Image (spheres, rainbow, N blue to C red):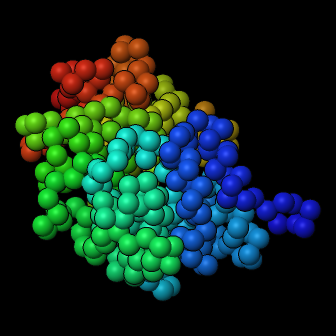
């Protein structure tokens, strides 16, 4: 950063979030009282499309910390000499504000956070509710220790636990709110059992076909939970919920004209619909010139890849790209619904995506 450039400040970041309507009333006061910099270690990285770049120098560190960007705080689960994959971070402040707004906490309510991370969200909850009402669990003992130290140095001592956030907290009893700050492939039913009827769960989900979506569930008297998707959200996955990017594909490639621009597959509304219609089909993508390139695979060895303006190549058994095209036309017939028209129901038997009404379940394709 050149001397002529002004280093962003945390009050400026809070003002930006407020101007965008993400911080109102009490939450603005909470964010103002809890500087993000207290919860970001000295060694951090910026997430780029293809790698994590070390942040060097105090001004660069402050510029990143006081901007609405995620800050990568750990690579390769802390192991030395790894490939440099981000495995822990301090989330975008705008995303934190969105999630806390959706959580809709009220005075004297108990909150359970899954994924303590740097401790920043725990500190915000402590400032809002009081530390005795905040509980947070973290799997990585090194990350947990650093968070506990940062929280204590800032004057907060919530209830902290090192353990698997997918499992219930022994002896905790029922909480009023649950927030996950790591991406889940599914909402573990055991976690719902820790939330009182009428309580709210806010979590980012990342399924095989999804790029990541926030869901806000309300727990029902019968122990089930349901609620709408609330926009996109990209988070580090819970370790037990990680998936390899793609399945292995079989056979020689077969080329044909692509009847569908692969960029359309990245629309969150379509991703939610296709993920329900085509379970166990995985998708990854990257930018390609003026468009995108996507890869899709299925566990039986079928696969396809397509780039904007180019032919599609298919592999293995069946015709996976034709299945995707068919699901797109179904989605068009439904009026190309936005992501916020979809919702999720979670029971002890699993979870189902629905469109517009919980009774309208999007069921898997027979193909």
Taking the spot 21% from the left edge, 24% from the top edge, the residue there is: 358
Query: Seen in the image, is 197 located left or right of residue 122?
Result: left
Taking the spot 75% from the left edge, 58% from the top edge, the residue there is: 8
Q: Could you tell me which quadrant the C terminus lies in?
A: top left
**Quarter of the figure with residue 315:** top left
Do we see residue 74 in this rendering?
no
Residue 267 screen position, x and y as percent: 48, 32
45 in relation to 291, above or below: below
Q: What is the total number of numbered labels drawn onto the structure image?
A: 0
128 in relation to 289, above or below: below
Query: Seen in the image, is 33 located left or right of residue 331?
Result: right
Residue extending furthest toward the right: 4
Question: Which of these two is toward me, 235 or 153?
Answer: 153
Do we see residue 340 in this rendering?
yes
Taking the spot 28% from the left edge, 45% from the top edge, the residue there is: 201
Residue 9 screen position, x and y as percent: 72, 59
Question: Which of these two is toward me, 107 or 57?
Answer: 107
Residue 68 screen position, x and y as percent: 63, 52
153 in relation to 289, above or below: below
**Quarter of the figure with residue 71:** bottom right
Residue extending furthest toward the bottom: 80
Q: Could you tell me which quadrant the N terminus lies in?
A: bottom right
Query: Seen in the image, is 176 located left or right of residue 229?
Result: left
Taking the spot 53% from the left edge, 34% from the top edge, the residue there is: 263
Residue 154 screen position, x and y as percent: 51, 73
């Amino acid at each position: 950063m050149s001397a002529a450039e002004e280093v962003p400040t945390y009050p400026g970041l809070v003002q930006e979030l407020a101007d965008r309507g993400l911080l109102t009333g009490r939450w603005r006061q909470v964010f103002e009282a809890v500087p993000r910099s207290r919860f970001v270690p000295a060694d951090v990285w910026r997430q780029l499309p293809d790698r994590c770049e070390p942040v060097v120098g105090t001004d660069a560190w402050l510029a990143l910390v006081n901007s609405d960007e995620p800050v990568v705080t750990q690579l390769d689960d802390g192991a030395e000499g790894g490939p440099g994959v981000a495995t822990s971070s301090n989330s975008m402040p705008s995303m934190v504000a969105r999630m806390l707004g959706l959580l809709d906490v009220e005075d004297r309510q108990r909150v359970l956070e899954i994924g303590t991370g740097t401790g920043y969200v725990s500190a915000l909850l402590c400032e809002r509710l009081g530390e005795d009402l905040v509980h947070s669990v973290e799997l990585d003992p090194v990350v947990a220790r650093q968070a506990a130290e940062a929280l204590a140095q800032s004057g907060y001592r919530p209830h902290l636990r090192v353990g698997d956030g997918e499992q219930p907290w022994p002896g905790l009893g029922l909480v009023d709110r649950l927030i996950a700050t790591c991406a889940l492939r599914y909402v573990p039913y055991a976690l719902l059992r820790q939330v009182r009827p009428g309580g709210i769960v806010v979590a980012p989900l990342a399924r095989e076909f999804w790029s990541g979506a926030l869901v806000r569930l309300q727990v029902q008297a019968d122990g089930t939970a349901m609620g709408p998707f609330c926009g996109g959200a990209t988070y580090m996955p819970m370790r037990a919920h990680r998936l390899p990017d793609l399945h292995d594909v079989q056979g020689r490639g077969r080329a044909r004209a692509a009847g569908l621009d692969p960029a359309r597959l990245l629309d969150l509304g379509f991703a939610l619909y296709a993920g329900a219609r085509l379970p166990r089909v995985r998708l990854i993508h990257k930018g390609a010139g003026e468009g995108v390139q996507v890869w899709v695979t299925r566990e039986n060895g079928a696969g396809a890849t397509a780039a904007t303006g180019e032919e599609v190549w298919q592999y293995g058994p069946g015709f996976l790209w034709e299945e995707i095209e068919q699901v797109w036309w179904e989605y068009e017939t439904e009026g190309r619904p936005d992501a916020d028209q979809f919702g999720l129901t979670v029971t002890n038997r699993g979870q189902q995506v629905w469109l517009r009404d919980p009774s309208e379940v999007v069921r898997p394709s027979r193909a």
